[in-house]
């Protein structure tokens, strides 16, 4: 008999040996590690090899939906990770409910490239709001808002002086007409347009510098800048054309007009001074800012993917042997620890963003506790020690949250931004843990929920739902921090 034939017979024997057994049969065969829930009466995989376990992904047994609930959850979070790496500026922050832009046109927006702040790119206005890829966001320091306000106020005063001066130049039109036919009409028309645009721009500057003198989110600062910047560009183009026209008259053909033209040059110089003041209010002047990253959200999403994937692997493969069950349950514990620790990162980072010392202290403690839990889960079989480490990691959340409440008060935005999602998550985890601990509903209907709807599946669904709520909360926290900034 050939080796191939022997191997084939061995595979056939193994395949014939593997089976789905009942609860009492498993215990009668001395494989009690396979069955610890007496209310699930059937569907236990017995004598499954590694390849059989993989194939059982598409079989119906009492672990099928334990595996698939977390595979689906893992795929959802993998998609969210892709989204996080291709995140765009949330356009609803920049628009009214009807989709219109209250402050600027799409071609006038500051932006980031490849997640890095570049002054040259930051000052250019080339991409629309839906094309702004970023991994970093900006929060304006109030000191720079004050600087912007003063610059705009100076420009407004200069423009007001110029607007009052333009009508007095009409007395020179007759002199212009007496020396060159048509000059007066052309100059008068251009002055008329300059006067109109100056009036509109000055009217826009006043609320801008008034608003900038107050604490504002970045979107409002950008909006004030971009609208003024668009008007400034239009006025600059008209001023350049008028200045060029006046220079063409500054020739020997009109020697007696030179003194009159100097009066008009005085007006253009005044407008240029005002425009220079506005030019100093550029996005590059906002460079000394704090930078808010979305990397804590990526950490959480990554931890969720790892946790849900390891859970799926555990439920799929652990039935091979008693030794294999120990190895895979440790992997499952490791994933849970990583997800608990990863869940802290967005909350702590965005809540303590303005106090870096506290921020890194809390993240350091969380990381140290997570490592300690990982070591405990691998190196000790003492369930009390293991459970104590898990509880210490989970309940440590009360420390930074309590710190925030003590510092800001329960009704402050620092707390309200995450408290409702946190309560919703707590309810889901509590309900899921209660279902899991009481083994509902199979406890009351033994044998009826062996494949579908037993407590462990419901617990998995609660975990995925709570994780999605936490993701949504982290995104809201990120947007809030992006808009709110830090007090000086």
Image: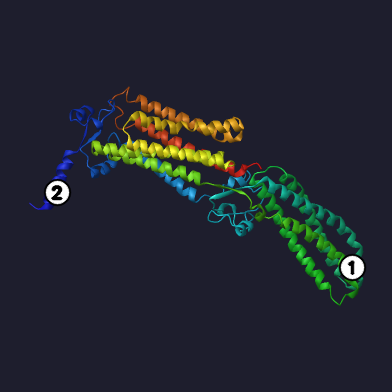
Q: Cβ–Cβ below 8 Å for labels 1 and 2?
A: no
Q: Residues within 10 Å of mark 1 (few under 14, many from 20)?
A: some
Badge 1 element: helix
Residue bearing mark 1: 260
The residue wearing badge 2 is 8
- Residue 453 falls in image quadrant: top left
Question: Which x, y percent locates residue 474?
Answer: 52, 40
The answer to whether 477 appears left or right of 59 in the picture is right
Number of numbered markers = 2
**Residue in the picture at 40% in, 26% down:** 434
Compare residues 147 and 153 and report the one nearer the observer: 147
Q: Is residue 61 above or below residue 482?
A: above
**Residue 415 numbered mark, or none:** none
Asked if 149 appears above or below 320 in the picture, the reply is: below
Which SS class for mark 2? Answer: helix
Where is residue 142 shown, x and y percent of the image? 68, 45
In this figure, which colouring scheme has been used for the structure? rainbow
Tell which of 350 and 315 is nearer to you.
350
Nearer to us in this view, 205 or 301? 301
Residue 131 visible here: yes
Q: Left of 60 or right of it: where is 476?
A: right
The residue lying toward the viewer, choosing from 481 and 345, is 345
State how far apart marks 1 and 2 are (Cα).
Answer: 108 Å
Task: Name the residue at the bottom extreme.
Answer: 252
Where is residue 205 shown, x and y percent of the image? 75, 50
Answer with mark 1 or mark 2, whichever residue precedes in sequence. 2
The crowding category of the residue bearing disc 2, from other C-alpha atoms within 10 Å (few below 14, some 14 to 19, many at least 20), is: few
């Amino acid at each position: 008999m050939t080796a191939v034939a022997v191997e084939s017979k061995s595979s056939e024997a193994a395949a014939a040996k593997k089976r789905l057994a009942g609860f009492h049969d498993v215990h009668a065969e001395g494989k009690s590690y396979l069955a610890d829930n007496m209310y699930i009466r059937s569907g236990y995989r017995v004598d499954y090899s590694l390849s059989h376990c993989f194939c059982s992904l598409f079989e119906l047994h009492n672990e099928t939906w334990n595996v698939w609930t977390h595979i689906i959850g893992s795929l959802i979070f993998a998609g969210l990770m892709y989204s996080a790496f291709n995140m765009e500026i949330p356009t609803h922050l920049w628009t009214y409910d009807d989709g219109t832009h209250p402050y600027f046109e799409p071609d006038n927006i500051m932006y980031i490239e490849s997640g890095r702040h570049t002054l040259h790119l930051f000052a250019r206005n080339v991409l629309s709001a839906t094309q702004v890829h970023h991994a970093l966001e900006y929060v304006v320091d109030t000191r720079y808002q004050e600087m912007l306000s003063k610059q705009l106020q100076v420009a407004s005063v200069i423009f007001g002086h110029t607007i009052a001066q333009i009508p007095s130049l009409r007395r020179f039109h007759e002199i212009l007409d007496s020396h060159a036919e048509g000059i007066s009409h052309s100059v008068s028309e251009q002055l008329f347009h300059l006067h109109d645009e100056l009036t509109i721009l000055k009217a826009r500057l006043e609320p801008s510098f008034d608003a900038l003198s107050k604490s504002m989110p970045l979107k409002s600062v950008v909006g004030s800048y971009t609208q003024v910047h668009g008007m400034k560009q239009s006025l600059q183009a008209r001023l350049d054309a008028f200045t060029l026209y006046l220079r063409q008259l500054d020739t020997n053909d009109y020697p007696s007009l030179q003194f009159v033209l100097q009066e008009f040059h005085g007006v253009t110089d005044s407008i240029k001074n005002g425009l220079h003041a506005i030019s100093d209010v550029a996005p590059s002047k906002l460079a000394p800012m704090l930078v808010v990253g979305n990397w804590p959200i990526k950490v959480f999403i990554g931890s969720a993917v790892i946790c849900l994937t390891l859970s799926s692997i555990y439920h799929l493969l652990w039935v091979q042997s008693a030794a294999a069950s120990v190895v895979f349950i440790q992997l499952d514990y490791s994933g849970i620890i990583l997800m608990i620790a990863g869940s802290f990162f967005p909350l702590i980072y965005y809540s303590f963003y303005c106090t870096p010392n506290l921020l890194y202290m809390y993240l350091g403690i969380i990381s140290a506790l997570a490592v300690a839990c990982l070591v405990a889960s691998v190196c000790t079989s003492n369930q009390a020690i293991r459970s104590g480490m898990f509880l210490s990691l989970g309940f440590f959340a009360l420390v930074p949250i309590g710190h925030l409440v003590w510092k800001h008060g329960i009704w402050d935005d620092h707390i309200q931004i995450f408290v409702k999602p946190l309560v919703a998550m707590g309810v889901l985890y509590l309900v899921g843990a209660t279902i899991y601990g009481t083994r509902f509903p199979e406890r009351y209907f033994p044998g009826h929920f062996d494949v579908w709807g037993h407590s462990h599946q419901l617990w998995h669904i609660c975990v995925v739902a709570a994780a999605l709520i936490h993701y949504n909360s982290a995104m809201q926290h990120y947007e809030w921090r992006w808009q709110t900034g830090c007090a000086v």
